[in-house]
Image: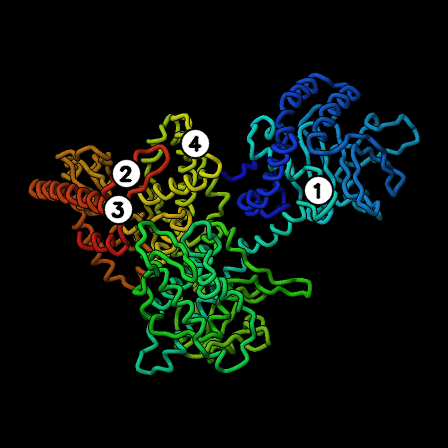
Amino acid sequence: MAIDITGISNEREFYTHHYLSAILENDLKEIFKAWKEKEAQDNIPQPHSLLRALRKDFFASQALLERERNIKERIKIQSDFTGKLLTALGYEYSTKTEALDDDNSIPIICRINRKDGAPEIWIIEVFDDQGEESDPLELFFQKDQYPTDDETIQIPETSVEEVITKQIFGLSEPPRWIILISNKQMILLDRTKWHDKRLLRFNLRDILDRREISTLQATTALLHKDSICPEDGMPLLDTLDENSHKHAFAVSEDLKYSLREAIELLGNEAIYYYRKHPNIKIYGRDMAGQLTRECLRYMYRLLFLFYIEARPELGYLPYKSKEYRKGYSLETLRDLELIKLTTDESKNGFFLHESINTLFNLLYNGFQSKQKKDIIASYDYHTFRISPLRSHLFDPEQTSLLNKVKLRNIVLQRIIELMSLSRPAKGKKHRRGRISYSQLGINQLGAVYEALLSYQGFFAETDLYEVKKAKEKHNLLETAYFVKTEDLEQYTEDERVYNDDGSLAKFVKGTFIYRLAGRDREKSASYYTPEVLTQCLVKYALKELLKDKTSDEILKLTVCEPAMGSAAFLNEAVNQLAKAYLDLKQKEIDQSISHDDYPKELQKVKMYIADNNVYGVDLNPVAVELAEVSLWLNTIYEGGFVPWFGNQLVCGNSLIGARKQVFHESLLKKQKKTNPTWLDEVPERVMPGKKRDKDSVYHFLLPDRGMADYKDNVIKKMAADEIKVINEWRKEFTKPFSKIEIEQLKKLSDATDKLLKKHVEMQQKIEYRTTDPLHVFGQKEPDGNRKPTTTEYKDNILHQE
């Protein structure tokens, strides 16, 4: 179960948000294990248990502080609790006075030095003399908190924040760490991050009141003496920081730039190959669109492999097999990313192409000596087995153009490099980091890929030069503008785009260009919703929806996203519904899932919800493919089947269509001027499960004033005569109906009902035949006679029906 960091504020990204919320748990497993072993072997209580035991003392001190206004008494009450708190975290409470460089002195309650005598950590306690909820950084040092009555001691007159910034961290030998403690909060500061005001803030009331084990574990792990200044070895916090930087690449902008370039490289390499085979036509807008989609699919495949190979515990690939790992894996090819290709054979050969195609084929067709019932990879001595993943993603028919192409090593090496390493930046100190796919979140992947949904690939029909708006910095991810050679002279130097070598950004005739053009993003509405927003919106929507619902009712809730994009909202809904189901089901049946089993059980419920209850619509057909992959990756687990969304995720416009809404026949007749007609009213919805009133007519059988209505003055001037004809037609078209016509419309509505009923029955039949059985926690075992079926089988059923 993921660590719950409620009560821990990661301000200005002390660690990256993605790291703290998604990766920290895995990096803390070893320390939690060590605590548990110490408790078992030496009877030493785990630190988080000691912290949890302070709950009663904390709220008792809070009650006293609420009533007490005398600063001396407030200091005594708070200090008593702080002493217990420090003991639980491995420190000794001992008030001392530390001199600063400006003759001022401050009280500290704990100081730990490095072996060379330099300070490693200072723990400082601050007190609120007003009894109000204050930020510890905004408080001031109190005379009564000093351990001596010496009247010569000079107390800083500025806030604690200023003292830390200008005086403590400004010392010739400053401490690396500071823990600031008030009556309600603890704040962890790292001198190396303080210039950006990055910090971790711990709300003691939230942490101790909730008594959430994972929160208490995270708190003690991040604040404990052994984590910050151990007697030997690297501090845990430095290890976490190093890991955080490694994984930060997963959510950076780098992959957006890399993916765009990779797709452009693939497209141009296809054109290069076709030029070598002149019998194949290489130009045409239709081909450019198809080539764009196939390049995206190719990159989706690589993404899937990066993701799955980084998660050997899922069992989809035989990563324990040395033969697979060293001979076939994509990870092995990643090791070749920076090897210099010096010979013509190494540059223009096809080793990488053949290796990747072999891997794609292994996944789609499988490789095994025995039949396996579930989708799981395994290995034997000197060999391995892979069960086929017959998904749309790896179906060769989905890349018919690229199937005819052989991609050179020099191109594929660059693509693998782009998807493996962070982009180089200016400055000698910057090192390219390896992108970690092992901890890359689905939302982060969605952000990268959805950013490019509104891009389009096209061929340069003549030599083109790229231009931009004057004074604006050129950005490859922003809208691109191209002009012909003869028009270039109309643009100033500041409006022209230059390559890194100083040459003009020129695209010769026939080049495949993959960029954001014109108003494509606005027209396709391809904007990615940040993870924090999807989490918030789904959380509060479900908060109302799930009131008084049983776990079984939660498992039957359907979700529809009318503009799904990469399925960010669908994935978030699946995540939160699955967790809500498991939490409630465990309470209802009074049965707990073990910590080790919980992740898989959660994934199974997520898979069940996605495969049975999730629906989505998007204008962009590429978005539908991306949503399929995104939902699959979000719900994948060891032994799981390939989910099929052929009848659930569709390309279309959710804002218009034939809804189950009707007008009463009385509104269709000729009316007095004061009485409304169907043109003035809003249609009534036929509620699910209810029959349509026989005296009503479906709205989509009737005309509307808005049809073919051109109000734009420019259009009116351009086609005045045609507009006049259209207006006369519309006037006749929207006349009230006669009795005979109304009867015909009612018969058409009756026929619609019959067809709709037949359609629903057909959909239910398709759904039953294409839904794979899946047992989830708290439910009965599914029918043992039903077996999972292939994607191809499901596609055939859909097309036949």
Residues marked 1 and 4 touching at CB (< 8 Å): no
User: Mark 2–mark 1 contact, CB under 8 Å?
Assistant: no
Q: CA distance from mark 1 to mark 4?
A: 35 Å
Lower sequence index among marks 2 and 3:
2
Q: Position of residue 676 (x, y in %)?
A: 22, 36
Which numbered disc, 1 or 4, marks the residue that appears first in the sequence?
Answer: 1
Residue displayed at 81% across by 28% down: 142
Is tag 4's residue or tag 2's residue first in the polypeptide sequence? 4
Residue identifier under label 1: 228
Residue 787: numbered disc: 3
Q: Secondary structure at mark 4?
A: helix
| Sequence-wise first label, 3 or 1 | 1
Q: Are marks 3 and 1 in contact (CB under 8 Å)?
A: no
Q: Could you give the CA–CA distance between mark 4 and mark 3, rounded to whole angstroms?
A: 29 Å
Of the numbered discs 2 and 1, the one sitting upstream in the chain is 1
Question: What numbered label is drawn on residue 532?
Answer: none
Q: Position of residue 644 (x, y in %)?
A: 30, 50
| Camera-side residue of 86 and 254 | 86
Question: Which amino acid lies under the numbered mark 4 shown in the image of this protein?
Answer: Asp
Image mark for residue 583: 4
Q: Position of residue 254 (x, y in %)?
A: 54, 60
Residues tagged 2 and 3 counted as in contact (Cβ below 8 A): no
Binning the other alpha carbons within 10 Å of mark 1 as few (below 14), some (14 to 19) or many (20 upward) gives some
Tell me the kind of residue under disc 2: Pro
Earlier sequence position, callout 4 versus callout 3: 4
- Give the residue number, with chain letter if any, for mark 2: 782
